[in-house]
Image: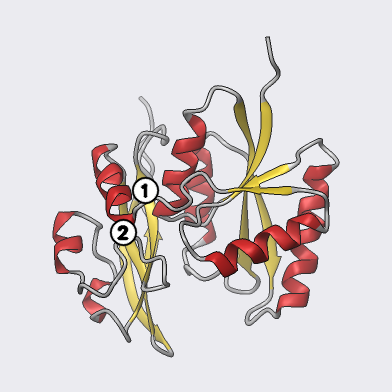
Amino acid sequence: MSTLESILFCWSGGKDSALALHTLLQQKDVSIAALLTTVTEGYDRISMHGVRRELLRRQAETLCLPLHEVFIPPKCGNPLYEARMEEALLFFFEQGIRRVAFGDIFLEDLRLYREKNLARVAMQALFPIWKRDTHDLIREFHAARFRSVAVCIDSKVLDPAFAGRELDESFFADLPPNVDPCGENGEFHTFVFDGPIFSRPVAFTLGEVVQRDSFIFRDLLPGNTQKED
């Protein structure tokens, strides 16, 4: 019997990450060593998405996967970001891991950036949903019964009311035609709270709306977890 390849997964907490992880978990020759996520110091939130660290931890718990957090300061510059990521990557390299998976779909410059940084530590990037049609991915997302909510939207391209909406059929029907259905150009970011890769839903309630520059964030508050009798 062949040994499973252990892969590190860069986890954002959003739907593209969930789809990419779901794709990997269906392969028989790999296993996931851990989820790797950047967290902003002082805010205790996922960088970019703004989701609370407690909800990130609950995601990892219900995914039954270890979580490795990389802490970066607010408005972190590339040199410091790359240094802290490299430290984390080397930690897993020493455990024998050579490939890191991402949920990117079609941004060539981002792929090249990731590949370049990984090459510095003799690791390779893996993109399980690369070049997939984003309309097809959303259909697959719904067919698999994933559920997610928009936690950050760019108000230059989307109405602020999209922040906090669940990504159901009405969400995509209301998207302007120039907006990618996966938000791959940064139009919106999401938090996945249920689906086939979760052992149970991640409970949350909607919090306040905050605007930073053109970005609208909808806070999510950790909900009560169900306890077994």
Q: What element carries label 1?
A: strand
Above-or-below relation of 142 to 44 = above
User: Residue 14, percent across and down?
Assistant: 43, 56
Determine contact: label 1, label 2, CB under 8 Å: yes
- What residue is shown at x 61% (from left), y 64% (from top)? 39
Indicate which disc residue 10 carries.
none
Classify mark 2: residues with Cα within 10 Å, few (<14), some (14-19) or many (20+). many
Indicate which disc residue 193 carries.
1
How did the renderer colour the structure?
secondary structure
Q: Please identify the residue farthest to the bottom as the structure is shown.
A: 213
Residue 38 is at least partly visible in this image: yes
- What residue is shown at x 60% (from left), y 61% (from top)? 111
Name the amino acid, label 1.
Phe
Q: Distance between the residues labelled 1 and 2?
A: 8 Å
Q: What element carries label 2?
A: strand
User: Residue 43, percent across and down?
Assistant: 57, 73
Q: Earlier in the sequence, mark 1 or mark 2?
A: 2
Which residue was labeled with disc 2? 149
Above-or-below relation of 35 to 171 = above
Using the rendered view, name the quadrant where residue 156 is placed.
bottom left
- What residue is shown at x 39% (from left), y 53% (from top)? 15
Residue 89 lies left or right of residue 101; in this view the side is: right
Name the amino acid, label 2.
Val
Residue 54 lies left or right of residue 99; in this view the side is: left
Classify mark 1: residues with Cα within 10 Å, few (<14), some (14-19) or many (20+). many
Q: Tell me the quarter of the image containing the N terminus.
A: top right
Residue 145 lies left or right of residue 69; in this view the side is: left
Q: Tell me the quarter of the image containing the C terminus.
A: top left
